Amino acid sequence: MIAVEDVTYTYPGAGSAALDGVSATIAPGTWTVIVGPNGSGKSTLARLLNGLLAPSAGRVTVDDMDTADEARAWDVRSRVGLVLQNPDNQIVGTVVEEDVAFGPENLGVPRDELRRRVDEALAAVRLTGLERREPHLLSEGQKQRLAIAGALAMRPAYLVLDEPTAMLDAEGRSDVLGVLRELQAAGTAIIHITHDLSEALYAQRVIALKHGAVAYDGPASALLADDALMASLGLEVPPLARLVSALRGAGLDVGDARTAEDVVEALWPS
């Protein structure tokens, strides 16, 4: 479990805290979406979860390891993978397989195990066959999946993604979200930071930040129903959620539809 306990973080020289008294727990195997307006502290929280930042006050623990304990830094980052918005900032290898191998190789993982981890990570993000491809020749969606593979090769229990679909077209976005669904189904906890509330429909839980504090923590459905809070957070009800609501209002049973494909299957079962 990741536990965030009354955490405050202030950047050096800043006049106010980026996060102020934030508390939350994230259980293994769950999918949590974090939303909020620009400057609300989402990216700061992502880096605190991974131990890249240490709290100014309060405490973050990952499976009982304090992220501020420098002696446990590699252990924490092995448990909590971090994928940034721009994959080019994370890609370090000259070919795909070298990039995926970089993290575990630096941990001293034996060669046979390293090969197994690289192959499994590439298969998980559907990049098998591109092992010798130069990263700059990949599409943006493939680059983002490569960044996810690099994190997966560390065998994390938790995967934190900071706006992973923001730079992608519809096809790339669909690919990345599909990979995340498969990873979560296989037991990896997903902590997904996004500006797009339609992506919250995949999650069991949404945490909304505002001015560095938690403004909401609960299911997406209750947040979507709170017009005042949605407006204060600068969020819009996604088209799919409006469609599902309209279909239910018309007396149609669409179940717990989270994607357009779910709606089609509910209305016209195969």
Image (spheres, grey):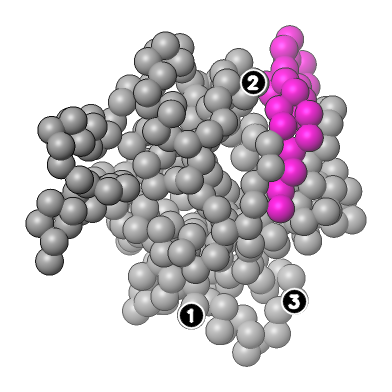
Nearest to N terminus: mark 2 or mark 1: 1
Where disc 2 sits, the SS reads loop
Identify whether 122 is placed above or below 158. below
Which residue, given by chain and number where applicable, does mark 1 sit on? 119
* Residue depicted at x 53% and y 44%: 32
Where disc 1 sits, the SS reads helix
2 vs 3, front mark:
2
What is the distance, in whole Å, between disc 2 and disc 1 at their CAs?
A: 39 Å
Amino acid type, label 2? Gly
Q: Position of residue 265 (x, y in %)?
A: 17, 57
Which residue, given by chain and number where applicable, does mark 2 sit on? 212
Magenta region: 1-23
Q: Position of residue 207 (x, y in %)?
A: 55, 32
In the picture, the quarter occupied by the C terminus is bottom left
Q: In the image shown, does 37 or 132 lie closer to the viewer?
A: 37
1 vs 3, front mark:
1
Which residue, given by chain and number where applicable, does mark 3 sit on? 108
Q: Quadrant of residue 195?
A: top left
